[in-house]
Image (cartoon, helix red, strand yellow):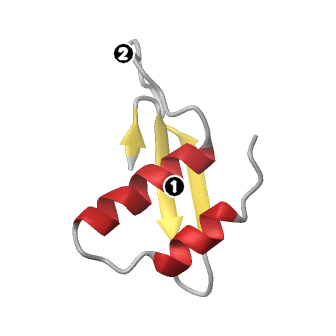
Amino acid sequence: MIDCDRFYELQLEGGFNLASSMVENYETQCDYQVSSDKEAVHLMIDHMAQNKFDTGTLEEWVNSIPNP
């Protein structure tokens, strides 16, 4: 998922992990940005659930992540 000047990748193989990094040479002003990695994961899980993916284990995992 790309959000303004950040790139998020939800890695699902061999356990769950979130990778994120900055988009190089991004020059446009951002009107809104995701406030945390946890919010980014929630957005991705919501998108998958809306497209009929079973997200039960992902929801358990993200709920175990401490709030920033």
Quarter assignment of residue 14: bottom right
Kind of residue sitting beneath label 1: Val
Viewer-side residue, 28 vs 18 = 18
Q: Quadrant of the C terminus?
A: top right
Residue bearing mark 1: 41
| Mark number, residue 33 | none
Whether the residues at callouts 1 and 2 have beta carbons within 8 Å, the answer is no
**Image position of 59 (left or right of 31):** right
Q: From the viewer's perspective, is residue 12 above or below residue 26? A: below
Instruction: Characterize the local packing of mark 2: few (<14), some (14-19) or many (20 or more) Cα atoms within 10 angstroms.
Output: few
Quarter assignment of residue 36: top right
Q: From the viewer's perspective, is residue 25 above or below residue 46? A: above
Residue at point 60% right, 46% down? 37
Residue bearing mark 2: 28
Which residue reaches farthest left?
51
Q: From the viewer's perspective, is residue 37 above or below residue 5? A: below
Callout 1: SS: helix
Callout 2: SS: loop
Quarter assignment of residue 21: top right
Residue at point 41% right, 17% down? 30
Expressed as whole percent of the image width and height from the top left, the position of residue 10 reads: 50, 64
Instruction: Characterize the local packing of mark 1: few (<14), some (14-19) or many (20 or more) Cα atoms within 10 angstroms.
Output: many
Expressed as whole percent of the image width and height from the top left, the position of residue 12 reads: 51, 78
Q: From the viewer's perspective, is residue 42 above or below residue 31? A: below
